[in-house]
Image (cartoon, rainbow, N blue to C red):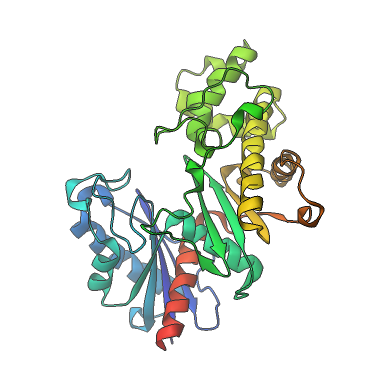
Amino acid sequence: MRIIAGIDLGGTAINYTLLDANERFLIEGLCEHPALTKQGPTICLQQIEDGLKIAADKAGIAVADIVAVGLDTPGPASATGVLSARGATNFSQQEWRGFDVRLGIERKLGLPVTYLNDANAGALWGHYTFFGDDKTKTSVSIVIGTGCGGGVIVNGEVIKGRVGFGGELGHGLVPYQSIPGIEGMVPHCNCGRVGDLESLASLTAIERTLLPYFLNKYPGHELGKVEDRNKAAKAVRGYADRGDAMCRDIFRVQAAAIGLFCDIMVNTFDPDAFIIGGGVLEASPEFGRWFLDEVRRNMPAQREEQLDIPIHSMPNGDTAGARGAAVDALAMARARGL
């Protein structure tokens, strides 16, 4: 058998998937193993190898059947998988700084390895789901989580950019002052910018900016009594799903910010589709549809020819990164005749 492995290396967990030559996934749901990134590269890479054996056993194949590996990690990192010399949130130890994680895993496993950042890997999977191998299609993906990631696929290829920062959509600025109902709000992002997409459309944005702002508008709300602000922020989605007015307002602002950003993307890439993922789309189907409708409603008026651009929900949730990494490696394996 010729099997491709997809490995999504996060800060606390590694997610695996396996793909055969017929483009059939051998693992349907999550297949996770602890990441141990805080113990440095040597232990973490051994953990990745150990977890791959567990994934192979789960799928009923031999590790020797694996001919190539697709890897994704959070950034910042270069387009080829060299982690930032300044460190990263999930790779903060000194040994990780400037570490070539793609090459390290390639040497550890003795297999060719491709690399994408996690947002681009998820974007590739979303694109592949809706368009397959069609090289004429372009898509823009936005993934809302603790931060806000994204990816752009043009003519079937992931846009990585000169040093790997292509598709960092969360740090693109949006004209947030035009969003009604947030007068006086100054949304700060961890990157230092004011008014980028992540400063409005992320869990961090809810905790730092949106929830405190709207609690002032809704005095006496139950979430105002929760001392742990992170816990309160995580509860906002459930309240919004149940129709709570304040929490719907919070997600309405997030949808508006995404709608404004999609307008920029329409006039930059003229894409065939938008794909939106993250926790907000993993609530009830009704809430997910409401949110996507709000995104559409908040996109400024487009040319008539562009009104039919679809907005899809990101498929496969937490496994999207590993699947996208596997699809990336499959293309490499085919090009090399593996």
State the quadrant of the N terminus. Answer: bottom left
Q: Position of residue 123 (x, y in %)?
A: 54, 59
Q: In this rendered view, identify the residue nearer to me: 282 or 218.
A: 218
227 vs 304, nearest the viewer: 304
Q: Please give left or right for residue 83 compared with residue 141 in the image.
A: left
Q: Is residue 223 visible?
A: no
- Residue 258 is situated, as x and y percent measured from the top left of the image, at 62, 41
Q: Looking at the rendering, in which quadrant would you find the C terminus?
A: bottom left
Residue lying at 40% horizontally and 33% vertically, measured from the top left? 190
**Placement of 94 over or under 114, stated as above or below:** above
* Whether residue 13 is visible: yes
The residue sitting at 56% across, 70% down in the picture is: 156
Q: Is residue 39 left or right of residue 4?
A: left
Left or right of 267? Residue 336 is left
Q: Give coordinates of residue 68: x percent, y percent.
A: 37, 77
Q: Left or right: where does residue 83 sit relative to residue 137?
A: left
- Answer above or below: position of 289 versus 41: above
Camera-side residue: 305 or 285?
A: 305
Residue 219 at x, y percent in the picture: 62, 10
Q: Residue at x 66, y 45 (%)?
A: 263
For this orientation, the residue located farthest to the right is 304
